[in-house]
Every structure is written in C-alpha cells, then in structure tokens.
C-alpha cells in the first residue's frame, strides 16, 4: 500500500489489541446515513513512474519562454545551493518550531533572517514571514490601526500607483474590519505619486499612508516627502518595497526625517522561483516600539538551563493560539520554507552580490526600454527615474500583441490597460540580470515584426 | 553542538562570486534615493554558507528523521515524488501573469485538483487560493458574511465556536468583523446541544466546527447541530484540520456543512516546511458558490482559463497577489493522483487504526485517557494530571523528555480544557514498531518521573540546547544580531 507500512500481521495484532473486528468497526461512531459509498470522481491510483510521466508531459505543454514580466514577481538567478539545502528533509519536513530544543536549526536560521531583513529595510525588527506581499500589506494596515492610537478614523491613503492587485487584496482582507481606503493620484508625466495630492487631507484624522518604492510602474517615488507628510499629520508611514532594490535604494527606516513605521513587501525576489505565483513569502519589519502590535511568528535569542545561547518563539501572547479572538492576526502556518530559501540566498550573495543584481537589473531594463521604444508605435510612458520596470504605451490594444509574442516564445510584459485605462494601451515590462543583451534584441525584433504585421488601432 | 551565527563567520571582502553578475555596474539611482551604507548581510564563501545551513538543518527534528506525533498537525510522510514533480523546470520558470495559453498544463492540474477535492468533500465548488488553513478560515467566514449581506441580513455577525476549537477560529471571526460566542463541550466530548440551542438566534452568522473535534472524537449529533443552526438562519463552517480522520469515509458536504477549508499540508501531505507554506483550499455548498475567492480555474471545452471578478461578480475578492501557493497545490495534486480513489479511504483507515492502537496501548500501560469510552479519530488525548500530582512532573516535562528518547513531542496543553494534556496524532505512515517504541518510551519516562523526577524537569539533556528560558526571551527581547 503506498506510504502505509502495515503488514497483514500488523493489522491483525493491532485490531486484536483494540478489540475491533476490522478497520470498519473503528468508524462505528459515525452515523451510517452519512457514510460514503465511493469516490468515483477521483481517478484510480498511479504509480510513481506513471505520475512522473503525466507531470512531465503536462509540464512540457508549458515549455519555457523568454520572460519580460515583473509586476510583483521577478525572475532572478537562484544559486544551485539554495534549493539543494532547502530540499533537505530536516528543513522541508519539519513544522513550526513549537519544541524549540528540537528545532534549533529552523530557529537560528529565522533569527539570522530577521537580522538580515531588518538591516535590509533599515528597521529595528522583523517577523518570521507572512503569506505574500499583498496579504502582508493588509496585515500592515491592520497593524497600523492598532499601533496608531491617536487615530480613530481607520482611514488609509493608498497611491493609485500601488500594485492594483495589492489594492484588491487589501479590500478583501481589511475591508471586513471597516478600514477605509482612499486613493492618491500619480503624475501623468513622471509616474510618481503626487505629494501635492495629499494636501486636501492635511489636518484630517488619517491612520496611515502607504507608499510603494519602486511603485507599480517601476518609477521611484519621493519617499522622503511622503513619509514626512505622514508624520506631520500624525499618520504612520507604511513602505511597500522590493527587497532586491534595497541593496542600492535608501531603506524605509531612513525615509524622511524619522523613517517609515512599517516596511513590508514580497520576498520572492530573494531566491524563490516564479512557479506560476507561489509559494512566495511576505516580509514585515517595524520599529521596536511597535513590536507587540506585529502579526506573525517572532524568534528571540535566549539562554538554556546551562546559560548557553539558544533560540525560541517569543512574544506568543500576541498570537491566536494564546489570545484567540483578541490576537493581532489569525495567521498560524506562514511561509517558513521560502524564508529558508531567502536566508540562504542573502547569505550567498552578500551585500555586494545583491547590489550587483539590483544595479544590473536596472541597467538591463534601461537597455530594454531603449530597444523597444525604437519600434514604431511604442513610446515610454513616464520620464522619472525608475528601478527595473517601465511602462510602455502602444498604439493598439496590448492583449493581441502579447498573444502574438507568446506564439514566438516571448512573454512580453503585463497588460495594464484594464487597471489604468487613462494611460491608453499600457504595457509594463521588466528585465532582470537574467536577460542578456541578445534576449533584449530578440524581443525588440519580435515586437517590431508583430507591430508591423497588424495595423494600429 | 553549537553553530556560530553566519554573521560571526563573515569576513569583509569574501563572497560567493559565482552567484551574481561580475561586471561592475554604475548605479544611476539619484543621490537622494541612494542607500548610504550597505546592509548587514554575511560575507562568506559558497562552502561556508552550504556547510553552515546544512549543519543548522541537522539540529532539527523532522518527519524524515523522527516520529513526529504532533496532534492536530498531521505530520505524515511527504512523498519525494510530490516534491520532484512539482519542481519541474517548466513549472518553476513560468511567470504567474504569462498568458493562460502558456500555462495549460498547470491549469489542467489545478482544475483536476478542484474536481478531486469537490469529490472527497462532497462540496459543490472549490477555490484553491487561500495560502494556509487560517486564510481558508478567513475566506469561509468572509463568504458567510457576504451571503448574509447579499440577503440584506446585516444583523448576523455572531460566530459560534466550541470551547475546544483551534485558536485560529475565534481569531478569524474577529478578522472578519464578527463577534465570538463560545459554547461548552460535554464530558463525553460532544458539543452541548442544549447550550447551542440557547445561543442561536437572528444574530447568528454561523458556527465553526472541527469534526472529529480537537478532542479527537467524532461529533455524533452533527445532524442535530446542523439542523439547529440552519433553522436559526446560520451557516455551518467545517474546519478541515482533522479531515485525515474521515477521508473517503464521510464527507462534510453530506453532513450538512455549507463551507469547509482543507489543510492540504496536513491531509494531502504537502511539506510543513518548518512553518509553511501551507494551503487552505475552501469548498462550498450551493448557497456560497457566487462568493468564492478568485481566481478559480474554469474549462471551456479543451481549454482552461482563470475565472476572475468578471465571472464571479459577488466574489469576496482576492486573498493573494497571484494564485495562492501554486507549488503546494501541485504537490497535493501529485499525492492525490498517486493515492487514487482507493487510497483516500486507506488514509483515514490506517490513521484511525494507528491512533486507536496507540490509545489502547497507552491506556493499558496505565496512562489516563481523556475520553476513554470513545473511539479515537486520527488523534486522541492523554492527561498527565495524576503524574503531575504524584510526581510533580507536568506534561511539558514529559514532552521535553520524549525529545531525549528521539521522539518529537505531541501537542501539549491543547485543547485548553483538558489539564496536563498531550494531543497525540501518529498518522497512517508510521509502522507498528514505532508506535510500540513510543509506548515503551512513555512508560520508561513515567518510571523516571517516579524515581528521578529531575531527569524530566531538567530535560532535554541530549539535544543541541537544554530547556530554554522563554520568560527571558520575552522580557529581554533579542530579535536581531548586532555586531559587538
């Protein structure tokens, strides 16, 4: 029997010990009227060889293409050592370190992660992960309501230039607790959030202001001005950041005069494969004064009975298994294995390697923009400095162009005309360090062909 | 055994050079947005990093190395094939926003997974997007609220939760803007139906139930409970944490539940990863179909596509940036295909056989069972209150001493209503010999408790660290390393 070790003799002996005639008798407390007759909708069992063939054939239909999409998930090189270690059963098949003495490997790794992430974001402390970037921002907004005791309004300002899916997830998760989200527009020329557009809110009760750096368009925001505005108006500043970019960009902890209050984002760029959307992990870091309002697991260093250092889950009084309906969040299982990958990734790259990845990605995107805007009918949307993404404007609907490119083996970017209709036919593109000059030329040629073969709208 | 922190092994100028682009790039970041000082990341060679994290892994207990009977967590074997075939390069390399035409293989897997989960739960629709059990719970209660709101029934904001429930249940109700009403359990482990009758009313949004409950026993009056809650206008939520106990034997949909979440990392054997990733897929009955979280996977003829807000205008919305924990879903898919329809029932049969055998053996060895007259589901509770009274050794002392004997400890002090308890879940993948060894260890430890209680109170003795000072950890917070 697959994955079940019992011999006939075992079963006999065990049933005899229990005093049951057969395994069916073990279910005799379940009323007979509910019992299942069969599961015809589940296909018969496959052997490992058969399922291997099935999966290999299915995967072959999704053969790899040259990818130029970012939009919240980024294709970076992942050192071979990362997943070789992550896949070790001792990490892979353990659980939440409830028994600290039997989980020192996971716990020490998480403590190292918290240190790296806090330093990367310029904050005092980090938790041990949330689900992903979007849901992590929802947790950050709920946390801001708890942490900003002066504010009673539960009003939170969001840039229109924030990833639109993050906005949807915020409404789905935080909307049930009556948080109100109001939108701050962006500059049509530069693509950055308009600091002047915050002015109508001056003097009002605002709980927090969210700012994404770089924003959804890839544009770099004036994070100092937004952070200072928030603090001048008794609001908290929440920074949504790309961890790779922080190797070269000013970290949230140093934004404005006092620094952002909460930094969060998606950890995927740190050694986690694209994998059609997950599992990734969300990170969150904050100032020391807010630690008791932070959701999720937190690891602390302490000592054992002999005075030797060791690591353990701490501040559990915030969590659902202790506080129940009064907990900071319902989160329990988080994304531990992905944090394991990110920690090993950051250790391998170090400060210099991560800065090289960031700077190279930025350079590649500039090369991509230069090459693609030479194609007739393609223009750059915004003129402000950007990180590793850019919005291009086409002279025709984007979706058919992307389908034609996909047929040529190129995933050409993200169609943003539906969330941003005022831009026209917007295409968000990205190039990381994994795209070579030749890749970029291949894309530019293909786009030229596709744009030539069909008329403009 | 002590492994220095990676930062303490760092030396300025050292790095794993093969891992990143070597050509120096001038940064074009405007000066006012540039980072001034580099982040505190280690500077180590590739071998140093590999050795360090390999050594750290060796400090862990895990399913691959130890019996791990952690109650309510279903720590069963995670077949290696599930990992390997979810990590094929085509699947790992695909961007989530790439056109659906470039992901038909993936979408077919996810569609078939939805269909299989519908079949094993008896529900009408399944959404795979929730990223863990707690997010599945959130989706479920949010759907219940959306359902009542769509009927202009705004008064229904109370969620009923038995006192034995997981902490995530009341915490979820709060996150959904509901209030929590607790009801007691009877001495035999079943819900107090009279107490339930007394609390239902026009304010009742629904009830959250785990069945078998966290007490390890099947809720025998479930049909009555369903009737009471439905008659009062509320809906029934099934917490699938214990689905392993009934898989292929009885389906939540047939018991009258309106919504259920499944922990794919428990019942469908995806790895727990040292604390995730999980997956909390939700299943719904007829009434909640329009409210499911998106995206779902739909099929038009031979073509698969994402279903989004346009297809389900009443959806509770999106809970993740893309499609939840896709890689976890693929692992569950491979597992279910390998078990097939006949294997589903084997899971619950052998999980229950192992639990009942272990329960009877521990009972015969003189340990007090919390619910001796009842069948165990896939887990059961031992209370060590006599050992605490007679020897001064509590459940935590037994748990820590078990680590010395090479067993991960069961869940301790949960459920909260049983004193000095161990919640023990062996799962179907453990052999009889390992269960017998566990019983022998428990007996030996009780003998130590009688004769040398300090052996327990000082435990563990043989692990990388001895018992850790949790009070100090919370009082003198040390959450990040700082250079001396």
Image (cartoon, rainbow, N blue to C red):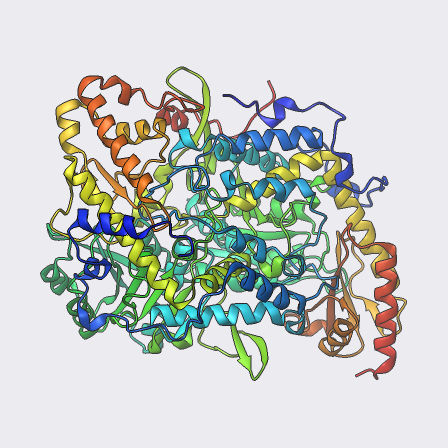
* Residue under the image location 36 percent in, 48 percent down: B73
| Outermost residue to the front | A9
In the rendered image, is residue B295 in sight? no
Hey, which quadrant is residue B149 in on the image? Answer: bottom left
Locate residue B339, reporting x and y percent: 43, 62
Decide which of B191, A125 is in the foreground and name it.
Answer: B191
Locate residue A233, reporting x and y percent: 54, 48
Q: In which quarter of the image is the N terminus of chain A?
A: bottom left
Locate residue B78, reporting x and y percent: 46, 50
Hey, which quadrant is residue B340 in on the image? Answer: bottom left
* Residue B405, above or below B233: above
Left or right: B130 as drawn, with respect to A376: left
* Residue under the image location 34 percent in, 46 percent down: A320
In the rendered image, is residue A95 in sight? yes
Query: How many numbered circles are shown?
Result: 0
Left or right: B274 as drawn, with respect to A212: left
Left or right: B166 as drawn, with respect to A203: left
| Outermost residue to the top | A306
Decide which of B482, A383 is in the foreground and name it.
Answer: B482
Q: In which quarter of the image is the C terminus of chain A?
A: bottom right
Decide which of A446, B263 is in the foreground and name it.
Answer: B263
Locate residue B273, reporting x and y percent: 49, 45
* Residue under the image location 78 percent in, 53 percent down: A385
Left or right: A315 as drawn, with respect to B45: left
* Residue under the image location 61 percent in, 61 percent down: A276
């Amino acid at each position: 029997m697959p994955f079940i070790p019992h011999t006939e003799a075992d079963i006999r002996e065990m049933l005899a010990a229990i005093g049951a005639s057969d395994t069916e008798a073990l279910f005799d407390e379940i009323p007979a009227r509910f019992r299942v007759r069969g599961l015809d909708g589940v296909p018969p069992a496959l052997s490992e060889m058969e399922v291997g063939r099935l999966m290999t054939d299915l995967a072959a239909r999704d053969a790899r293409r040259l990818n130029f999409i970012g939009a919240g998930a980024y294709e970076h090189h992942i050192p071979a050592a990362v997943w070789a270690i992550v896949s070790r059963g001792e990490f892979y098949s353990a659980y939440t370190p409830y028994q600290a003495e039997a989980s020192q490997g996971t716990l020490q790794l998480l403590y190292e992660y918290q240190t790296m992430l806090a330093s990367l974001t310029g904050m005092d402390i980090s938790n041990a992960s949330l689900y992903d970037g979007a849901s992590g921002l929802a947790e950050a907004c709920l946390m801001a309501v708890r942490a900003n005791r002066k504010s009673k309004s539960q009003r939170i300002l969001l840039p229109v230039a924030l990833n639109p899916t993050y906005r949807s997830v915020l409404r789905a998760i935080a909307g049930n607790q009556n948080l109100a989200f109001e939108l701050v527009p962006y500059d049509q020329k530069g693509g950055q959030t308009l600091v002047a557009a915050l002015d109508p809110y001056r003097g009002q009760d605002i709980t927090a202001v969210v700012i994404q750096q770089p924003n959804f368009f890839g544009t770099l925001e004036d994070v100092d001005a937004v952070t200072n505005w928030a603090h001048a108006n008794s609001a908290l500043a929440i920074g949504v950041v790309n961890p790779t970019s922080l190797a070269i960009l000013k970290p949230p902890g140093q934004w404005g005069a006092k620094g952002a209050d909460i930094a969060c984002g998606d950890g995927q760029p740190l050694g986690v494969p694209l994998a059609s959307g997950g599992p990734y992990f969300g990170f969150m870091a904050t100032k020391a004064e807010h630690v008791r309002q932070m959701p999720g697991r937190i690891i602390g260093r302490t000592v054992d009975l002999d005075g030797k250092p060791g690591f353990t889950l701490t501040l559990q009084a915030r969590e659902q298994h202790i506080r129940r309906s009064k907990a900071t969040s319902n989160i329990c299982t988080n994304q531990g294995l992905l944090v394991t990958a990110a920690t090993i990734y950051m250790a391998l790259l170090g400060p210099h390697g991560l800065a090289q990845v960031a700077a190279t990605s930025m350079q590649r995107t500039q090369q991509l923009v230069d090459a693609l805007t030479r194609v007739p009918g393609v223009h750059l949307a915004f003129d402000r400095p950007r990180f590793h993404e850019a919005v291009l404007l086409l002279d025709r609907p984007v979706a058919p162009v992307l389908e034609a490119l996909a047929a040529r083996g190129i995933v050409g970017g993200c169609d943003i005309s539906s969330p941003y209709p005022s831009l026209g036919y917007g295409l968000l593109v990205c190039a990381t360090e994994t795209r070579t000059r030749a890749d970029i030329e291949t894309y530019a040629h293909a786009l030229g062909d596709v744009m030539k073969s069909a008329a403009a709208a | 055994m002590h492994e220095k922190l990676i930062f303490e092994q760092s030396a300025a100028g050292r790095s794993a050079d093969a891992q990143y682009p070597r050509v120096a790039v001038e940064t074009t970041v405007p000066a006012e947005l540039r980072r001034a000082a580099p982040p505190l990341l280690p500077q180590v060679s590739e071998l140093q990093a590999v050795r360090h994290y390999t050594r750290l892994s060796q400090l862990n207990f895990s399913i691959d190395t130890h019996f791990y009977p952690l109650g309510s967590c279903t720590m069963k074997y995670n077949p290696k094939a599930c990992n390997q075939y979810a990590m094929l390069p085509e699947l790992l390399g695909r961007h989530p926003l790439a056109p659906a035409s470039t992901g038909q293989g993936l979408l077919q897997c996810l569609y078939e997974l939805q269909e299989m989960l519908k079949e094993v739960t008896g529900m009408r629709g399944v959404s795979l997007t929730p990223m863990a059990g707690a997010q599945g719970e959130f989706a479920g209660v949010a759907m219940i609220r959306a359902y009542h709101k769509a009927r202009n029934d705004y008064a229904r904001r109370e969620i009923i939760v038995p006192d034995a429930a997981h902490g995530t249940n009341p915490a979820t109700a709060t996150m959904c803007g509901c209030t929590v009403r607790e009801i007691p359990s009877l001495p035999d482990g079943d819900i107090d139906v009279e107490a339930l009758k007394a609390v239902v009313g026009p304010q009742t949004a629904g009830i959250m139930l785990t069945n078998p409950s966290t007490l390890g026993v099947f809720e025998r009056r479930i049909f009555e409970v369903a009737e009471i809650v439905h008659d009062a206008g509320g809906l029934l939520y099934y917490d699938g944490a214990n689905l392993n106990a009934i898989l292929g034997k009885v389906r939540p949909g047939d018991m009258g539940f309106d919504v259920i979440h499944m922990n794919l990392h428990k019942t469908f054997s995806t790895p727990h990863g040292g604390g995730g990733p999980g997956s909390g897929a939700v299943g719904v009955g007829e009434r909640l179909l329009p409210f499911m979280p998106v995206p779902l996977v739909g099929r038009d003829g031979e073509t698969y596509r994402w279903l989004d807000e346009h297809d389900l205008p009443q959806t509770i919305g999106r809970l993740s940036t893309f499609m939840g924990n896709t890689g976890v879903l693929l692992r569950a898919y491979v597992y279910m295909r390998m078990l097939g329809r006949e294997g589903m029932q084997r899971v619950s049969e052998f999980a229950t056989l192992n639990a009942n055998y272990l329960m009877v053996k521990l009972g015969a060895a003189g340990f007090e069972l919390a619910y001796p007259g009842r069948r165990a589901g896939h887990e059961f509770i031992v209370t060590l209150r006599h050992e605490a009274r007679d020897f001064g050794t509590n459940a935590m002392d037994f748990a820590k001493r078990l680590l010395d004997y090479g067993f991960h400890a069961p869940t301790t002090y949960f459920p909260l209503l049983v004193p000095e308890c161990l919640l023990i879940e062996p799962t179907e993948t453990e052999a009889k010999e390992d269960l017998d060894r566990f019983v022998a260890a428990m007996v030996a430890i009780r003998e130590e408790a009688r004769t040398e209680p300090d052996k327990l109170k000082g435990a563990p003795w043989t692990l990388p660290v001895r018992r850790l000072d949790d009070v100090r950890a919370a009082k003198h917070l040390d959450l990040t390393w700082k250079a001396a």
